[in-house]
């Protein structure tokens, strides 16, 4: 089998992974997450344009976010477990080729059903692509740079929010929403050429079948980690799915400046992802995630305050930036939990463990955006924050069940 992470693998002393972090391979893997992030999050910025162009409601287009995550969540662990049975590099290239095909379909989609099929096609391969990217860790980064590598791969999504999504939104407003997907198609082709040039071709076989890998879910620590990320993501996506309407209708940002607002929010998300790497260094195993319980509680308070954002627009804008700073703080800590627990108790499931953060986060996206759609339909944008706060409190309650050992705490 191939494509499995083995954090115990040693590098030769003089390999590039030992001498510097931002090698061409690492940059290409970050760029892969960047492309996946643009494709996934672009809907937030161009949602009104698509709704107008296809003659459907904004809520109907917003449902694409939920449906994307519904397809993403089950496909990620299944695809990641299956990918362990095939050559890693070839599997990676095939996944990106399917991703490219899905975005070409988005570009030419004549109606909503075709766009839906295209989005589901992209969702089916996106999570597995992230998991396979993680499996390059022992080949492109030293053990001391593990949490840094994790944080930067996840940060590719935030960089997409900072740069890709606002630019895509501007392109959609200037040239039409299809032009945004044309940009994604062009950049994906460039990415595939870079992958061919710099990614290592080696693989790491592990002698375990498909079904035995799923014994990982029998571990209570893994289940608590999954639910914590699920609730944490749902807390943010109740409002994030409708970030453009919130900026436009609640905060009062003119339509021509919405892309700037999205860029500022994305910058906060990037800081959130990068700082999550520092939080993940506070111990090993379950300790880093257990230690962020106060962060979930503060997040809940900020989400409740979002209900009053329309009263003081400037304060509301600052509040949105603060929410962006909290959006991804759990990412690296949860990934450390999955990988360390798997390495300790389920070494044959490392490839599957690499996929759990993407899986659980996207279940949270599906749940949060679905709840957000219902709340927006029946109560309006004002109530999105308080409903998100409920999920943040559930995340805090979940991590309360994690009990790190003294060794994990670093004592």
Image (cartoon, helix red, strand yellow):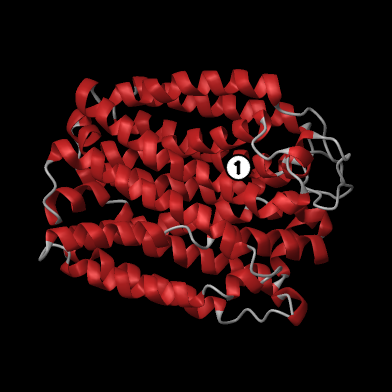
User: In the image shown, does 191 or 11 lie closer to the viewer?
Assistant: 11
Residue 88 versus residue 137 in the image, above or below: above
Q: Residue at x 24, y 59 (%)?
A: 318
| Dot 1 crowding, Cα within 10 Å, few <14, some 14–19, many 20+ | many
* Quadrant hosting residue 407: bottom right
Q: Residue at x 59, y 70 (%)?
A: 289
For the image shown, how many numbered marks are present on the structure?
A: 1
Q: Quadrant of the C terminus?
A: bottom right
* Quadrant hosting residue 3: top right
- Residue 368 visible in this rendered orientation of the protein: no
Q: Quadrant of the N terminus?
A: top right
Query: As drawn, is 169 to the left or to the right of 158?
Result: left
Q: Read off the residue under disc 1.
A: 130
User: In the image shown, does 101 or 181 lie closer to the viewer?
Assistant: 181
Q: Residue at x 39, y 59 (%)?
A: 325
Residue 320 versus residue 345 in the image, above or below: above
| Residue 302, position as x, y percentages in the image | 31, 70
Q: Tell me the SS state at disc 1.
A: helix
| Residue 211, position as x, y percentages in the image | 77, 53
Q: Residue at x 76, y 61 (%)?
A: 342
| Residue 309, position as x, y percentages in the image | 17, 64
Query: As drawn, is 308 to the left or to the right of 201?
Result: left
| Residue 100, position as x, y percentages in the image | 51, 24
């Amino acid at each position: 089998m191939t494509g499995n992470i083995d954090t115990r693998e040693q590098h030769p002393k003089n390999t590039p992974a030992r001498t510097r972090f931002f090698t061409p391979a690492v940059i290409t893997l970050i760029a892969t997450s960047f492309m996946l992030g643009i494709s996934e999050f672009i809907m937030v910025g161009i949602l009104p344009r698509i709704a107008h162009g296809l003659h459907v409601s904004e809520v109907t287009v917003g449902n694409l976010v939920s449906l994307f995550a519904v397809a993403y969540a089950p496909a990620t662990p299944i695809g990641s477990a299956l990918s362990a049975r095939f050559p890693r590099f070839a599997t990676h290239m095939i996944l990106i080729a399917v991703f490219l095909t899905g975005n070409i379909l988005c570009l030419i989609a004549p109606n909503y059903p075709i766009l839906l099929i295209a989005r589901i096609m992209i969702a089916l391969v996106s999570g597995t692509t992230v998991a396979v990217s993680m499996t390059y860790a022992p080949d492109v980064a030293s053990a001391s740079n593990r949490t840094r590598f994790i944080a930067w791969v996840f940060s590719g999504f935030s960089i997409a929010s900072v740069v890709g999504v606002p630019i895509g939104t501007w392109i959609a407003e200037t040239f039409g929403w299809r032009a945004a997907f044309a940009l994604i198609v062009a950049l994906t082709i460039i990415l595939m050429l870079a992958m061919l040039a710099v990614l290592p071709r080696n693989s790491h076989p592990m002698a375990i079948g498909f079904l035995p890998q799923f014994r990982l879910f029998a571990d209570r620590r893994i289940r608590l980690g999954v639910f914590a990320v699920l609730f944490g993501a749902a807390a943010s996506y109740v409002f994030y799915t409708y970030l453009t309407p919130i900026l436009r209708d609640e905060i009062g940002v003119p339509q021509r400046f919405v892309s700037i607002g999205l860029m500022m929010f994305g910058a906060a998300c990037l800081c959130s992802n990068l700082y999550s790497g520092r939080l993940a260094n506070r111990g090993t195993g379950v300790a880093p995630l257990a230690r962020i319980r106060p962060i979930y509680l503060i997040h809940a308070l900020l989400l409740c305050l979002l209900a009053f954002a329309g009263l003081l627009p400037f304060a509301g804008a600052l509040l949105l930036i603060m929410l962006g700073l909290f959006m991804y703080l759990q990412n690296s800590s949860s990934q450390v939990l999955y990988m360390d627990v798997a390495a300790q108790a389920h070494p044959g499931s490392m490839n599957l463990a690499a996929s759990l953060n993407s899986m659980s986060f996207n279940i949270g996206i599906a749940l949060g955006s679905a709840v957000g759609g219902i709340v927006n339909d029946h109560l309006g944008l004002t109530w999105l924050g308080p409903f998100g706060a409920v999920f943040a409190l559930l995340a805090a309650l979940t991590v309360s069940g994690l009990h790190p050992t003294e060794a994990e705490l670093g004592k």
